[in-house]
Every structure is written in C-alpha cells, then in structure tokens.
Amino acid sequence: MKAKGIFFTVLSALLFGVCPVLSSKTYQMGSNPLTLTFYREAMVLPLLLVTLLARRISLRVTWRELLALSLVGVLCRGATTLMLNVAYNYVGVGTATTLHFMYPVFVALLCRGLFRERLGRAKVLALVLASAGVVLFLERGGGSNALLGMALALCSGVTYAAFMVAVGKTSLSRMDPFLVTFYSAAAVAAGVLLADIPLGQLVFRLPPKAFFYTFLIAVGSSYAAVILLQIGVRYLSATTAAVFSLFEPVSCSIAGAVWLGETFTLQKLLGSVIILGAAGLLAAAKPEVSPDSQEALALLMSPEGFPHPPESPEEETAAEK
C-alpha cells in the first residue's frame, strides 16, 4: 500500500514538474502568460464538471461561498498561475519552480500571523534555511529581469500559501475539493477575460500544437496531478506525501535543462537543495492545512464526497438531530 502511495505521489510531482516546460514551449508558438492562464483554467472546467456530476456532488453554493471562492480563485489561484507563467520568461522554469517551493515557509508565517500558531524550532530553522537558499539564487550580472523573475516566483509562493490557508482554515475546508477547484478555476477564467478588455493580450488563434500543449498543461496540472496526489495522500498520509511532492521542482529543473537548455549552476543547485530541505523539514514537522485523517480522506475519495456545509446554524442543528 505504501509503495502505491509513493508511486502515485511521485507521478503527480513529475506531472506538475513537466508542465512548466510545455508552458515555455507554447510561448515559442505565440502564446503568452495571460493566454496560458486563461486556457489552463477554462479547459479543465468540463472535466471537473463531469467529475462532480459522476460523484453526485451538488453544485449548489451560497452567495457568501461563491464570493469567497471567487476572491480566493482570482487573488490566490489566478495570481499564482499568472506570476509563475511570467516568471518562466525571466529566470527559467527550474529556478521559478524551486523558488515557488518557498510556499511551505509562507504557510507557516501566515498561520503564525493570522492564527497565532506557534513556530517551533523546526519551523524557525526552516525559515532560516529557506532564506539562505534564496540568496544563493542571486547572481552577479543577472540584471533587473532576473530580479523581477525571482520576485514573481517568490510572490507566487505567497499567493499559493494564501490559497492553501484559505482553503484549509476557513469554511471552504468543508467543501469538496473538486467543487472548490471548479468554482475557483471558473472565477480565474472569467477574471482573465475581464482583465483582457483593456489589455488585449489574449491570443485566440494559436497553432494546433500550441493548443495541444496547453490542453496537456490544463489536464496534467489542474486535474490528473491533483487526483494522483489525493490518491497518494490516501495511502501515505498528507505529511509523507508532502515530502515526496518535493520531486516536482527537481523534475522541473531536470526537464528545463534537457528540453529547454537552461543552465543550472552549482550555486543554484546548492540553493535548490537548501530550499527543498527547508520545505521537507516543514512538511515532516506538521502539516498545517492538509487533512491527515484516513477517515476524511476515504470520504474524499468516495463517490459521495464531502457533504455540503449547512447554510445556517438552524440547519446545522437539524442535521445533527
């Protein structure tokens, strides 16, 4: 059982890691970060809808939940995807993905600042190590573009951490994960369309190969990899799965070097090892937002999924009776 969990988790990480390489390929065919962000979210919506209907999960949400999902989707999920897509142009997919993996550190800081969660020795050590690892990515003569790319990659870690905290620490945690993904993805797609009215950067005419790569990115990163990770968590627990998820930046760096010819210096390699070590230390210490209950995870993977949260205290009382 454990071997199955490791296999599914590593396969998920490999999918997450290869998708940024395909992103860079689409840029060479006329796409751009805004276009990729839009199609990545829009293309996965039919698959998510079919999954929700097949599992008999109600699409009903309250107006308050819809507002929360929209805000979290646009400001966290959408911002993360867009900033990472832009960062690929400036520092490469390997560097951007590794810096993005600072997000466990940001999760710890957000939980400390917002929920007064205690930072133990392991977390403090991880913060110091992660900061040192980022410093090793600074190179002389990198120019303002390199600094901008690093800043965007790090900020994508902040927004992704905010997404994890919002989903794990608010009422959204009681909703089915696929339902959260569906509405947040829809919000991002709609938000990009609105933003494109003054920007005019969306590209609707792309070569068939570019659309094919974009479809693979959408299905691979926003659907298949997520399902594989959930299966892996079911077998391993969230803590162990989080450690094996560190294969993502490693696979991304290797794929970027092989298929895109990206250089990866010894200094960056050392920085990557330190950052991933810090992330692994945090993951092994205590999962902050991932469910670690086998009962809850079994329910998550069942056809029924999570029950819809009650709309009012009266309904909650009635449900308990």
Image: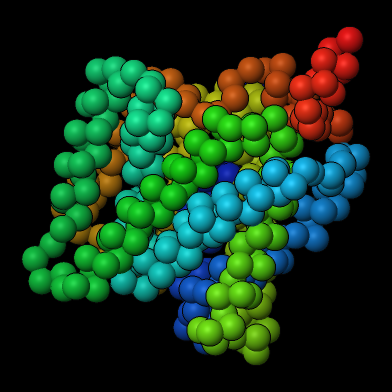
x and y percent of residue 210 in the render?
61, 80
The answer to whether any part of residue 251 appears in the image is no
Instruction: Please tell me whether residue 299 is drawn above or below residue 25 in the rendered image.
Output: above
How was the colour assigned to the protein in this rendering? rainbow
Q: Position of residue 240 (x, y in %)?
A: 50, 25
Q: How many marks?
A: 0
Q: Quadrant of residue 185?
A: bottom right
Instruction: State which quarter of the image contains the C terminus.
Output: top right
- From where the camera sits, is residue 195 visible? yes
**What residue is drawn where x is 44% and y is 50%?**
159
Task: Give percent across and percent down for residue 18.
Answer: 51, 58
Q: Residue at x 82, y 21 (%)?
A: 314
Write down the quadrant of residue 180 in the picture.
Answer: top right
Q: Residue at x 41, y 70 (%)?
A: 86
Residue at position x 64%, y 32% in the image:
171
- Check the image and report above or below for 265 versus 90: above
Q: Quarter of the image for the N terminus: give it.
A: top right
Relative depth, front residue between 3 and 131: 131
Q: Residue furthest left?
A: 140
Whole-percent x, y for residue 189 in the image: 65, 66
- Figure check: 49 above or below 201: above
- Vertical order, 78 against 262 (above or below): above
Taking depth in this image into account, of 191 and 285 the one nearest to the observer is 191
